[in-house]
Image: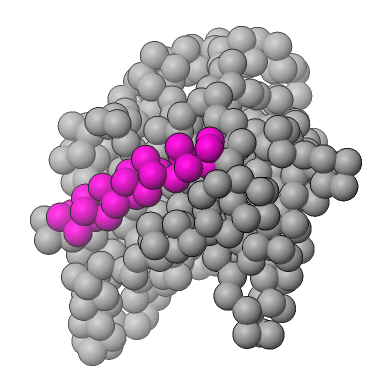
Amino acid sequence: MDILARSKAMEAQGKTVMHMEIGEPDFSTPQPIIEAGMRALQNQQTFYTPALGLPALREAISGWYQTYYGLSISANRIVVTPGASGALLLVLGALLDQNKKVLMTDPGYPCNRHFATFLSSKAKPVPVDAKTNFQLTARHIADYWDSETQVALVASPANPTGTVLLETDLKNLVTAVRARAGMLVVDEIYHGLTYDGIRLPTVLAVDNDAIVINSFSKFFGMTGWRLGWAVVPADMEPVMDRLAQNLFLAAPTISQHAALAAFTDETMEILEQRRAQFEQRRNWLLPALRELGFHFPVTPKGAFYLYADCRELLTSTCPDSQSLCRLFLDSAGVAVTPGYDFGQHQQQNHVRFAYTTSERYLTQAIERLSKVLGKPA
């Protein structure tokens, strides 16, 4: 928030800021989705939908699992929500008892731990690093699970690291969590945004009773439409229905009608082109940052983030990631997120770059950082 406030103040003064701190793609929503939303408005489809979502959209998501993953997932298990955050709120509300714990990675998406606190439960951050691909493992489950733990939450691809969980990783996690009578929740909101020829399996392929959080925001480019979904075991449907009715009634109606166009061939062609552009940006930015002195012990395989070890660049006047990010913003007009946003583990030694803007802007950002760091561009 400090970096964001500073960058906004600079822009208000007429200065140009290169935004590499924002986890929002620069691409607009694909036109077929926009047109579907406009048709819904013109047809006055503005009334509440059922709490679990528009039946046609739940069926469309079910069809997506069949087409993309080869899995038969009943539409009755799919809960449409206001964003992935709405899905996680419902899921944790259904699973967590008061004062119980949910394991999650440190570093990790910062809001997850606040959901647990909001629900009078506890987040149990597990320190992770490059040795485990910045992901939870079965060993972590064995070491950190206790009598108060009910849930393990992982993300693949992950924010802020862009690392992924492959099928063997998921199987090992499922086995470890099931052995402790717990539930595994997998954040798959960046599925579709993977590189180097990787196509990730959903956890549902290895455990039909696992819980998935997903979203129309990232791969489908619908951030401001606020639409996500969860896949839950069939016996959780009634409690998810009750929670949704009490907490937000239903997801936005226009957004749901618009999202029906997300799975068409026309939209998919657009999304694949964008995925390829993200991969090109990663392939350009990663070596450019390494030349400046940032270290990447793990090459990210998904999402649109680079989580960089910045220790080589720290000095007595700039001793941690937060002061380094302030230097970049104040002296170069480049906004980058400090590791402090993502947890406690080695927070002072890492920064996150988001390649959510064009290569032209990324090039300008690298040129500006090169001058500040006294290195050739």
In the rendered view, would you say 214 is above or below 19?
above
Name the image quarter holding residue 231. Answer: top left
Question: At 22% from the left edge and 46% from the top edge, which residue is drawn?
Answer: 64
Q: Which residue lies at the image location 59% right of the left edge and 31% below the top edge?
A: 295
Q: Is residue 216 above or below residue 340?
A: below
| Residue 29 visible | yes
Q: Residue 112, can we see it?
A: no
Q: Single out the residue that lies furthest toward the left.
A: 265
Q: Residue at x 67, y 55 (%)?
A: 372
Q: How many marks?
A: 0
Residue 234 part of the magenta segment? no
Q: Is residue 26 left or right of residue 195?
A: right
Judged by its main secondary structure, the magenta piece is helix
Looking at the picture, the colour scheme in use is one colour
**Residue 264 at x, y = what percent?**
14, 58
Q: Nearer the viewer, residue 319 or 182?
A: 319
- Please state the horizontal and vertical placement of residue 253, each as a whole percent of the image: 36, 73
119 w.r.t. 359: above or below: above
Position of the N terminus by quadrant: bottom right
Q: Quadrant of residue 34?
A: bottom left
Q: Name above or below for residue 205 compared with residue 88.
A: above
The image position of residue 117, as x and y in percent, is 76, 46
In the image: residue 338, left or right of residue 295: right
Q: Position of residue 185 (x, y in %)?
A: 51, 33
In magenta, the rendered stretch is 268-291
Residue 287 on the magenta span: yes
